[in-house]
Image: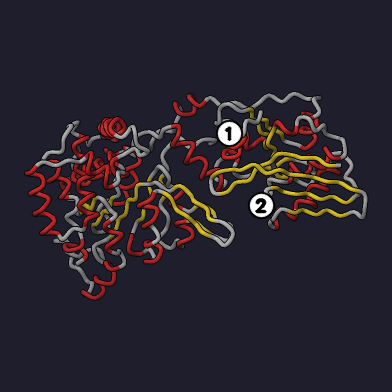
Amino acid sequence: MLAKVLSSAVLGVDAYIVDVEVDIRQGLPTFQTVGLPEAAVKESKDRVKSAINNAGYRFPEDRITVNLAPADIKKEGTAFDLPIAVGILAATGVVPQDRLAEYLILGELSLGGRIKPVRGSLPVALAARDSGLRGTILPQRNAPEAAVVTGIGVIPVSTLGELVEFLGGRKAIRPKSMDLQAIFEHRPSDDIDFSEVKGQEHVKRALEVAAAGGHNVIMIGPPGAGKTMLAKRLATILPPITFEEAIETTKVYSVVGMLTKEKALVTRRPFRAPHHTISDAGLIGGGHVPRPGEVSLAHNGVLFLDELPEFKKHVLEVLRQPMEDGCVTIARAVTSITYPARFMLVAAMNPCPCGYFSDPKHECTCTHARIHRYRSKVSGPLLDRMDIHVEVPAVRYKDLASMDKAETSAAIRERVNGARTAQSHRLKRTKIHCNAQMNNRQIKKYCPVGPDGHRLLEAAIDKLGLSARAFNRILKIARTIADLDQAPDIGVNHVSEAIQYRSLDRRSLFG
């Protein structure tokens, strides 16, 4: 007897349909799985057999062959337990086969027949909708995550017996639904605010410009100047995440298995701050079975690298591709997987190992050779990709003791939203959303500068020795500053401020 069940697997952050074909023939009792199954898939035969018997059904003592098609792609994970069990029950006549073509089925089985959660439910629901299926049958815990996809029924099940009753038409299960508007309206409020930062007004301004245009930032200053405090509050002035961005980001978290029953959708921009001991695979992604790294978990959000020179140099160098392309590609012998990685990079570092080089109030104890080794860990090409360089001096006592109320994150965010609105209108016919993502052709089109601005740029480039990439970044920053001023054209004052944010370039700081 032959039966076919539709299931799904995840490749990267997208899912594809897998046909689970079960053939039962008379012969010596064997259970063989073909179609490039990994170890966890091969082990499913023991879980499936125990689950079927303990759920009160008979496991056939015949020759069982399970094929996972397409057979040229490796299958991994435990999500095929449930479709294999349903296929066996359908081949033996326990489950009618007429409804199996309407649903995608996936889930892990316990030995007692309970259905456990799996990873990647959101991409699977999207694949089911795009394939024109009626719905998807998932573990109960994964149902809220999949239900954020509209236009498809999500059937939550908790036991194998419950699923058999549903497929047999003897039990009705109400599809899971989610109120997306309510999810976005009840986003958790920020427990930190820019008003808590004393002084550092020029750094706040630089971060406002960065948030308005999606620019990368590097902050350089002595210990205790507030670099980490400022970086953590950058997320509070970013524009709210859109539904499309939330789906993109949630897909990554779904694949990694970082979603909970209470948090079915990522409704806030991520803020990731990996430790400097992280490996290149942990940062970019990789492993025997490629998984997303921190750059993908920060997609549509902020990646904060504190103590930048303490990261291994080869780890920092692998950031170049995602910073330029907005994605990261992991190549393996069998396949190549691409993960999204469009993020704002915020880095912080000391000017020297002890942290007090050029500090007027503390003496630096580092030798020139030690300072050179420390600074050389941040390469010129990586620094070129940092749009904004800003010095963060030690906070003065006058600012610390001041009782004046600083500007709140909400007030800054309002200006940022206004600048992003102007960019969205300007870039509506492109696939980008902010000034930092513009390519050379778009820079030439949207960032024209007058004669006075060109003379100022020429003098700055001659003095600072900037690269062509740095020149383009100055133009993009000037465009963002003009957007914050709601100015249609880039003025000399906008160019002048943008040049200030490159004053820590190689010749002055890393030369």
The residue depicted at 81 percent of the width and 28 percent of the height is 168
Residue 434 seen in render:
yes
The foreground one among 77 and 143 is 77
Q: CA distance from mark 2 to mark 1?
A: 21 Å
The residue depicted at 31 percent of the width and 39 percent of the height is 434
Label 1 sits on what residue type?
Asp
Instruction: Establish if 469 lies above or below 451.
Output: below
Checking the image for residue 150, the label placed there is none
Residue for badge 2: 75
**Residue most extreme to the right:** 27
Name the element at disc 1.
Answer: helix
Q: Is residue 388 left or right of residue 24?
A: left
Label 2 sits on what residue type?
Lys
Report x, y in % for residue 39.
70, 58
Instruction: Establish if 178 lies above or below 232.
Output: above
Is there a contact, CB below 8 Å, between mark 2 and mark 1? no
Name the element at disc 2.
Answer: loop
Exactly how many numbered labels are in the figure? 2
Residue 197 seen in render:
no
Question: For the residue carrying disc 1, how many other residues have a C-alpha within 10 Å: few (<14), some (14-19), or many (20+)?
Answer: few
Q: Is residue 87 left or right of residue 419?
A: right
Residue for badge 1: 130
Quarter of the rendering containing residue 151: top right
The residue depicted at 69 percent of the width and 52 percent of the height is 71
Report x, y in % for residue 38.
68, 57
The residue depicted at 24 percent of the width and 41 percent of the height is 209
Say whether disc 2 or disc 1 marks the residue closer to the N-terminus: 2
Quarter of the rendering containing residue 358: bottom left
Report x, y in % for residue 83.
74, 41
